[in-house]
Image: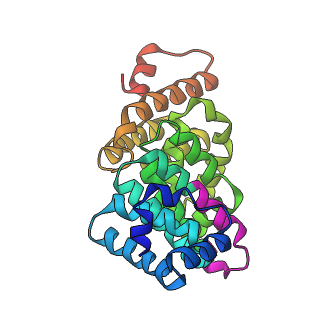
Amino acid sequence: PVTEFLSNEGNVKLLKQDKAQNLAFLHREFGIGAVEVEALYAYAKWNFECGNYGAAAEYLYHYRSLSTNPERAAGALWGRAAANILLQDFDAAVDDLAKLKEVLDVDTFAPVAAQLAAKAWLMHASLFAFFNHENGMNALIDLFTQDRYAAAMQLAAPHLLRYLAAAVVVNRRRRAALKDLVRLIAQERYEYSDPVTEFLRLLFVEADFEGARAALAAAADVMDADFFLVGTREAFVEAGRQFLFEAYCRCHRQVSLATLSEQLGM
């Protein structure tokens, strides 16, 4: 009954913002109660598992407008975000992830371990959307540098530092985030490091230009094999060379062009 109701666009327009009012209206006019609404959740999940992501996203959207169960509504939001990512509708996925963040930010009574895990899951899921969205780099930096999410990254998923580092390096408008990022990379070095993070540490903490140059070359190879970063490889290498050039010139009163070209690999 509930899918039949939702298939009629005129019926859907009758629904209001008030969920309790909607449920009372559906029960009175169409014989649809809480059991049928919960069946919609199960049906959406079944569609998702069958690969019918468009149907799953649509049913989960309607489920959230009807359900008064906050846990199930949050689960529907996770499912809708996943469905939109798989549909490659990244605008919708970014919106879903923003709503998920709002839900997680107000859920302060959950056990600390559960809060950390949920934030780590959100950051992982966001990679699919942010690296395919026109403003994704800014959104990634905004999310990953917030105190609670930075703490979750340090405690549960330090490997995500690679993606934050790449986003900051290629985004020239967010150079202000570089200082805190370098401090975080140096602090977490014994938990996690790779050529992308090591490039920044060697350059800005150690002032090791030879080591930074080698790390930049290694980072390019790492990014070639990284599902999310392969599309930003050229921009990262170009920006990395600019970082090297600026730092090298700050430390020397005279610069040999031959030495500089060797440092930059050009």
Q: Is residue 48 magenta?
A: no
Residue span colored magenta: 98-115
At x 39%, y 60%, the residue is: 83
Q: Nearer the viewer, residue 159 or 152?
A: 152
Q: Residue 255, how many percent across, how many down?
A: 53, 16
Judge whether residue 113 is colored magenta.
yes
Residue 209 location (% of width, % of height) = 50, 35
Kindly indicate the quadrant of the structure image that contains residue 216.
top left
Q: How is the image coloured?
A: rainbow
Q: Residue at x 57, y 65 (%)?
A: 65
Q: Is residue 222 above or below residue 46?
A: above
Q: Do we see residue 191 in this rendering? A: no
Total numbered badges shown on the rendered structure = 0
Q: Position of residue 219 (x, y in %)?
A: 39, 43
Which residue occupies the extreme bottom position in the image? 35
The quarter of the image holding the C terminus is top left
